[in-house]
Amino acid sequence: MAIRFLRYNDAEVLRKPAAPIKKITAGTLRLLEDMVETMHYHNGVGLAAPQVGISRKVIVVQWQDTLYQLINPEIMEREGEIVTEEGCLSFPGVWGEVKRSKIIKVKALNPQGEEVAIDAEGRLAVIFQHEIDHVNGEVFIDKIIRFTDPEAEEEESVSDQVALKD
């Protein structure tokens, strides 16, 4: 396993749709392992292959005690709406509120090539949407409705605090 170099800001690979994986190879499995190590090294909760310079539809997500390694992920169903604060390893220091679906269903292949369906809600749904956007050539800064500063000591209303925690 190896820590891969992250791509930042205006890297072309971040803004173009990635190609699907047609066959899972040893290289695909090595990419997944390297992405997990890279994500953990940078204290992230998700990482997409374009963020390490590989234009392929591969994502990894670590949420609580579960590690998801997904190939060719697609969002099949969406429900509800949520506004949360997001950041991105490819845009260090940039934070903002983004509108996302509250509940989603993701279809993908696991590393063994089996089709999996994942029902996700709240923060996990947000993370999946953020990473799937990456493999579709979309970046969160284009979806920000309000830039934020998580370090700022500013009074928030109770409704703002609830929205940011979802």
Image (spheres, grey):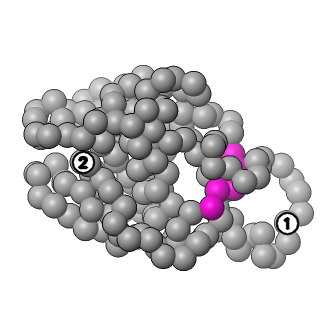
127 relative to 95, above or below: below
Give the Cα separation between the discs numbered 2 and 1.
39 Å
Quadrant location of residue 56? Answer: top left
Q: Is residue 54 left or right of residue 92?
A: left
129 relative to 82, above or below: above
Task: Please name the residue that numbered disc 1 is placed on.
Answer: 156
Q: Which residue corresponds to the image point at 20% horizontal and 64% vertical from the top-left?
A: 116
The N terminus sits in image quarter: top left
Residue depth check, mark 2 versus mark 1: number of the one nearer the observer: 2
Percent position (x, y) of residue 87? 61, 46
Q: Which residue corresponds to the image point at 10% horizontal and 39% vertical from the top-left?
A: 23
Tag 1, which secondary structure? loop
Amino acid on which disc 1 is placed: Glu
Q: Which residues are magenta?
A: 95-99
Percent position (x, y) of residue 13? 43, 27
Residue 51 at least partly seen: no
Residue 153 at least partly seen: yes
Magenta stretch encompasses residue 162: no
Percent position (x, y) of residue 146? 76, 52
Amino acid on which disc 2 is placed: Ile
Quadrant location of residue 57? Answer: top left
The earlier-in-sequence mark between 2 and 1 is 2
Q: Is residue 148 left or right of residue 144?
A: right
Q: Is residue 156 left or right of residue 89?
A: right
Q: Is residue 122 left or right of residue 38?
A: right
Q: Which residue corresponds to the image point at 34% horizontal and 47% vertical from the top-left?
A: 60
Task: Please name the residue that numbered disc 2 is placed on.
Answer: 71
Percent position (x, y) of residue 101? 52, 68
Q: Main secondary structure of the magenta part?
A: strand
Q: Residues within 10 Å of mark 1 (few under 14, many from 20)?
A: few
The C terminus sits in image quarter: bottom right
Quadrant location of residue 41? Answer: top left
